[in-house]
Amino acid sequence: MILTQQERRIFKRLSFTSQVHITYNGSDKVVACKDVNTEGMSLYLTDDSLKRFDQIAVRFDDHDSHFPALNADAEVIRVQAVDRGFLIALEFIAIY
C-alpha cells in the first residue's frame, strides 16, 4: 500500500496565519506562516528563493498571540507553486 504525503502525517496541523522571521544564507525575511505542528510548518513566500533540502532558521516573535517566542532550525521538504507565490513545507530539525 502506498501512502500519500498527507496520509503519512502523524499529527494534525494547526491552521492559522501569522508572521514569522526566517534566516537563510545570511538574509532575514518576514513571511507568512500558514500552519504548524510538532514536526514542521508551512510558509508562504512570494518568491522561490528556497529550494528542497535548504536549511533555514525560523523565529516566532515573542509578542505573537498564537505562540510564545520560539526558535527552530528547519529543512525545506517541499516547494509548491500556488497563486502568486510558493507554499514551503518545512520539517523541524531542532526547536529551542
Image (tube, grey):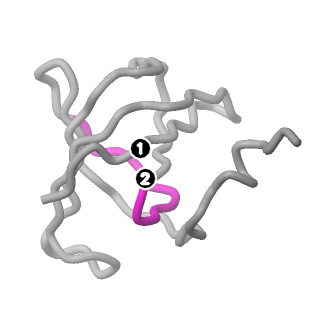
Report the residue at 49% width, 49% height from top: 42
The three-letter amino acid code for the residue at tag 1 is Glu
The C terminus appears in which quarter of the rendering?
A: bottom left
Who is closer to the viewer here, 31 or 89? 89
* Magenta span: chief secondary structure: strand
The quadrant in which residue 5 appears is: top right
Tell me the residue at 17%/64% (across/down): 70
Across and down, in percent, residue 36 comes to: 46, 62
SS under mark 2: strand
Q: Is residue 50 left or right of residue 69?
A: right
* Residue lying furthest front: 1
Q: Circle 1: is it few (<14), some (14-19), or many (20+) Cα within 10 Å?
A: many
Circle 1 — which element? strand
Residue 79 is drawn in which quadrant? Answer: top right
Q: CA distance from mark 1 to mark 2?
A: 4 Å
Q: Which mark is residue 35?
A: none
Judging by the rendered image, the residue that carries numbered circle 2 is 40
Tell me if residue 67 comes above or below residue 92 in the rendering. Answer: below
Q: Which residue is mark 1?
A: 91
Residue drawn at x 51%, y 36% as measured from the top left: 88
Q: What type is the residue that disc 2 sits on?
A: Gly
Q: Residues within 10 Å of mark 2 (few under 14, many from 20)?
A: many
Picture coordinates of residue 12, whole percent (x, y) = 60, 70
Q: Residue at x 43, y 52 (%)?
A: 40
Q: Quadrant where the N terminus lies? A: top right
Q: Specify start and end residues of the magenta stretch as a single range.
A: 29-40
Residue 86 locus on image (x, y percent): 57, 31
Residue 35 among those drawn in magenta:
yes
Answer whether labels 1 and 2 touch (C-beta < 8 Å). yes
Tally of marks = 2
